[in-house]
Amino acid sequence: MPDRAPQPVDRQLPTEEARDLITLVRDIAAQEIVPSAAEEEDAGRFPRELFTLLSQSGLLGLPYDSEYGGGDQPYEVYLQVLEELAAARLTVGLGVSVHSLASYALAAYGTKEQQVEHLPAMLGGGMLGAYCLSEPHSGSDAAALRTRAVRDGDDWVITGTKAWITHGGIADFYTVMARTGDEGPRGISAFLVPGDAQGLSAAVPEKKMGMKGSPTAQVHFDGVRVPDARRIGEEGQGFAIALSSLDSGRLGISACAIGVAQAALDEAVAYAADRRQFGKPIADFQGLRFMLADMATQIEAGRALYLAAARLKDAGRPFAKQAAMAKLHCTDTAMRVTTDAVQILGGYGYTADFPAERYMREAKVLQIVEGTNQIQRMVIARHLVGPEER
Ligand SMILES: Cc1cc2nc3c(=O)[nH]c(=O)nc-3n(C[C@H](O)[C@H](O)[C@H](O)COP(=O)(O)OP(=O)(O)OC[C@H]3O[C@@H](n4cnc5c(N)ncnc54)[C@H](O)[C@@H]3O)c2cc1C
């Protein structure tokens, strides 16, 4: 019988260094992530020590400048690393993506002085970041946020509650969008808040459908005082910084989604080759062969789409529309492919004895975070026909 075990994804990588990086990530995934992923997700355990290892291995600052502790890698490479990590365990892939999102504001908009002071610890010094935009009453309408920062001498005093914060309560730094001016997007500024700041606390993490190992919590700012030297960008520029961070972050979500989808396809292929019904492997039935073919095709299309957007970004060209398209397509693909994988495994697919059901629960959140897929369609449409009339 031919070998039908899944093969590692054959990646197009621009350099020898990038190929070495993928080999390193596959080794870490096989040895340190996959063996404990199901058990730790079940127990809701966040693998903090793994993030220390990723930082020591240079994998927490890949797309940033090596002058500040980053890895100098193009997005084309960084995203493929993320895809491999997410295929091993979404809590890890998404955690790296959120850390990168949280680092973006300072790396792209910070002053040289701020970057020299903070970035090396953030990008390669073992720190873990969180990105604080959403609030209990403002999710998709993020510009309606109410957390306020009030000037007091050389300091700002931040008061309010952020919601749904990935790494809330365990992060070493929080990139926080807070209102410093009038209502609306132009009244918002960005701040870099240390995790041990007085007055910062986190609620008990949410009980989620999936990604239970990744803590998601409300974060309270009760008169948190930060010096003006921790304000990122200009006063009133915070919302533009938040949106620009999300353009890149959405590419990270796209890559994570394709990682989860690929893991589910690999599981389905291996199972279909092994499981026999009616005297032959179920992989011989055309009904399932066509499903597998469709799953693989959607995944390849998703990978090509996020890589095309990444290459635009790497070339310094506008990529926001393509990032929204990639997020929409890749996360919808992850939902569809993981659902089909459960179907291919039959009754076993619906049990925790196989990872297919975990992949399906994990895929769902990717259609929601960093702008729901309805919001992605709004972004794409704006690029096509301009803004909606108010
Ligand atoms: C596990 C998890 C981790 C997260 N991590 C973070 C994080 O680290 N940092 C952070 O800041 N946020 C984070 N979020 C928040 C996430 O970004 C929001 O949940 C998301 O933006 C949607 O906001 P909402 O949940 O308030 O939904 P709402 O905005 O209330 O939307 C509800 C529904 O209405 C739809 N909708 C809203 N407006 C429109 C419209 N104009 N047209 C059509 N449909 C619309 C939405 O698509 C959705 O289906 C996280 C969320 C989750 C679940």
Image (spheres, grey):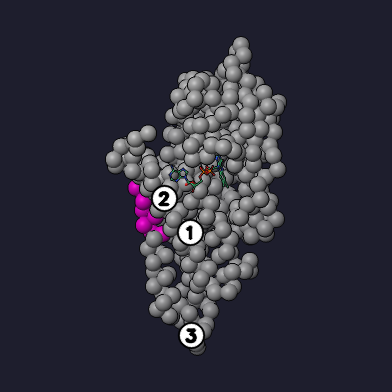
Farthest residue toward the front?
A: 390
- Quadrant containing the C terminus is top left
Q: Which of marks 2 and 3 is nearer the N terminus?
A: 3
Q: Earlier in the sequence, mark 2 or mark 1?
A: 2
Q: What residue type is labelled 2?
A: Leu
- Disc sitting over residue 12 in the figure: none
Relative vertical location of residue 227 with respect to residue 18 in this rendering, above or below: above
In the figure, residue 357 lies in which quadrant?
A: bottom right
Instruction: Give x and y (percent) for residue 73.
Output: 44, 40
Q: Residue at x 30, y 37 (%)?
A: 386
Q: Within 10 angstroms of label 1, few (less than 14), some, or many (20 or more) residues?
A: many
Relative vertical location of residue 316 with respect to residue 325 in this rendering, above or below: above
Could you tell me what secondary structure mostly forms the magenta stretch?
Answer: helix
Q: Within 10 angstroms of label 3, few (less than 14), some, or many (20 or more) residues?
A: few
Farthest residue toward the top?
A: 153
> Regarding mark 1 in the picture, which secondary structure is present there?
helix
Q: Which amino acid does label 3 sit on?
A: Lys
Residue holding disc 1 = 335
- Disc sitting over residue 280 in the figure: 3
Residue 281 lies within the magenta run: no
Is the CB atom of the residue marked by disc 2 within 8 angstroms of ligand 1's nearest atom?
A: no
Between label 1 and label 3, give the one nearer the viewer. Answer: 1
Q: Distance between the residues labelled 2 and 3?
A: 38 Å
Residue holding disc 2 = 328
Q: Which of 264 and 205 is in front in this view?
A: 205
Question: Which contiguous range is marked in magenta?
Answer: 299-308
